[in-house]
Image (tube, coloured by chain):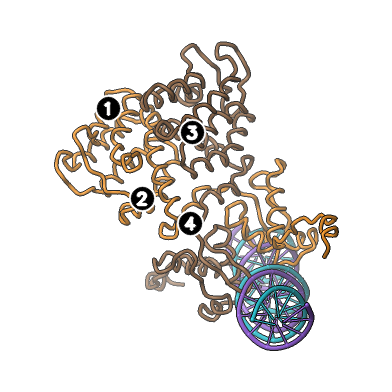
Chain colours: A brown, B orange, C purple, D cyan
Amino acid sequence: MTDTYKKSLNITAVDSSSLVDKVEQILIDLLISEKLNPGDQIPKELELTKMLGVSRTVIREALNRLKTIGLIESTKRKGSTIKSPDLLFLLRKSLIPNILDQATLKDIFELRLVIEIGMSDLIFERATPDDIKELEEIVKFEPDSTKEVLFDIDHEVKFHGKLYQISGNNTLLDFQTILLPAFRYVYDSRLIESPEHDSKWVSHQDLVKILKNGSATKLRNAMRKHLDRHFRGYFK
Amino acid sequence: MTDTYKKSLNITAVDSSSLVDKVEQILIDLLISEKLNPGDQIPKELELTKMLGVSRTVIREALNRLKTIGLIESTKRKGSTIKSPDLLFLLRKSLIPNILDQATLKDIFELRLVIEIGMSDLIFERATPDDIKELEEIVKFEPDSTKEVLFDIDHEVKFHGKLYQISGNNTLLDFQTILLPAFRYVYDSRLIESPEHDSKWVSHQDLVKILKNGSATKLRNAMRKHLDRHFRGYFK
DNA sequence: AAATGAATTATGTATGACATAATGCATTAA
DNA sequence: TTAATGCATTATGTCATACATAATTCATTT
């Protein structure tokens, strides 16, 4: 092969994606194309084999992927129909703490702090008297903040879980339950140091009082202080 | 069928899940079992057919699902290895605004507000002088807040996108880019009313000033005010 | 010693056959 | 007439087999 020959060539990278990859993308494009809505049917497997000119195996694998990410569902005789995907369903499946890399685990943990502070406004607006009563029940058993006690993750989960529920945002609530295994894993594996209380610490009981008698702004800032022991693991 | 006969029956619902469903779960359980880590190999397809007593088709479909949610990857000759999944990659694929139901869209929009308020602490701690300079560049072109102007979503995205980047949390940053289509969709489809400025509105320019000279708490509360026009779509 | 080529191995694709669940329709029994 | 039963149909679910293709190893050649 001579240099001149090389120069005359105009080589473009070959498309190394598999057939299934291509079919998958074609189908996703089909779904995105505004014309299709949840409940609509997509062509049968055999029709797709004819339309796209690939084997049923390939069609099935591509459909299987869409099914996996919750974009379609299939039933016998009926074929496949478009579905409004449950975003968190995927996270639920793929979030296996021991195979997540540490950077992602840390990000997730941080995400929790971010969400719980930002959530204050939703909580303050949406908490009902019954909700507050329930919170008061929960914090009755809160470990004394002045004493050196083990960090009680179960109590933690109970209290903050209730907050997520009060937020009235189902996506957030699901988020919390899904991320919980990751949180526990982070604590258990000592990826961050176990939190300690200090004098200025805002307890759960304090939070409930503020929720009852304070303002959204006060709650927001108190929540930040409450979580401070976690933040300190990150900042200097 | 007599009543006495009915009573004596103790019928439990049959397991109607497909073979692929079962194999998928078996494999996921295998991954969860602490002993397996990223990089580890899992048995070959033919080995699995023997171990589980199902056809290669079923094995392949189950493996294909794990591949789809990013738990494994496969190469020819080498087989399949465990992978630390990219959580956001999944969201990216399944988040197709026009087939999401409205409740989820609303949740997502709300999630954005929550995150941006809660993120203030990360931003304040991690913003470098260069970051602040860049922000100042961006807000130079900010529409005047006293005038009645169209809500400029591109400018919005530019400014807040930079904030996500400053947060130093890659998961958050990805989040934002993924959720963006959903945001745009919410605005375009008028699911929430278009925001209007009022006298007490905190502008982007105000935010940058506070980031430069204020405190984390001030930034947090200012961000809440900045986003207030969105919140007002939700509360009363 | 480097380049080439053949054998090997495990995933990727194709095809045909049959199993199974859902549905509609015809038939039957009360 | 009506409800129950059985049958045919249809599209997905599963199986088996064959071959294609990419990655790796190792022997062969220059």
- Say which amino acid is labelled 4: Lys
The mark nearer the N terminus, 2 or 1, is 2
Q: Secondary structure at mark 2?
A: helix
Alpha carbon separation for disc pair 4 and 1: 37 Å
Residue A59 visible? The answer is yes
Q: Residues within 10 Å of mark 4 (few under 14, many from 20)?
A: some
Provide the chain ID for the residue under circle 2: B
- Whether residue B47 sits left or right of residue A4 in the image: it is right
Residue carrying label 4: B93
Quadrant that contains the C terminus of chain A? top left
Q: Is residue D23 above or below residue B153?
A: below
Residue D2 spot, x, y in % from top left: 66, 76
Q: Kindly indicate whether the residues beneath marks 3 and 1 are on one polypeptide chain.
A: no
Between residue B8 and residue A158, name the one nearer to us: B8
Q: Residue at x 27, y 37 (%)?
A: B135
Between residue B148 and residue B34, name the one nearer to us: B148
Residue carrying label 3: A110
Residue carrying label 2: B183
Alpha carbon separation for disc pair 2 and 3: 23 Å
Residue B225 spot, x, y in % from top left: 29, 33
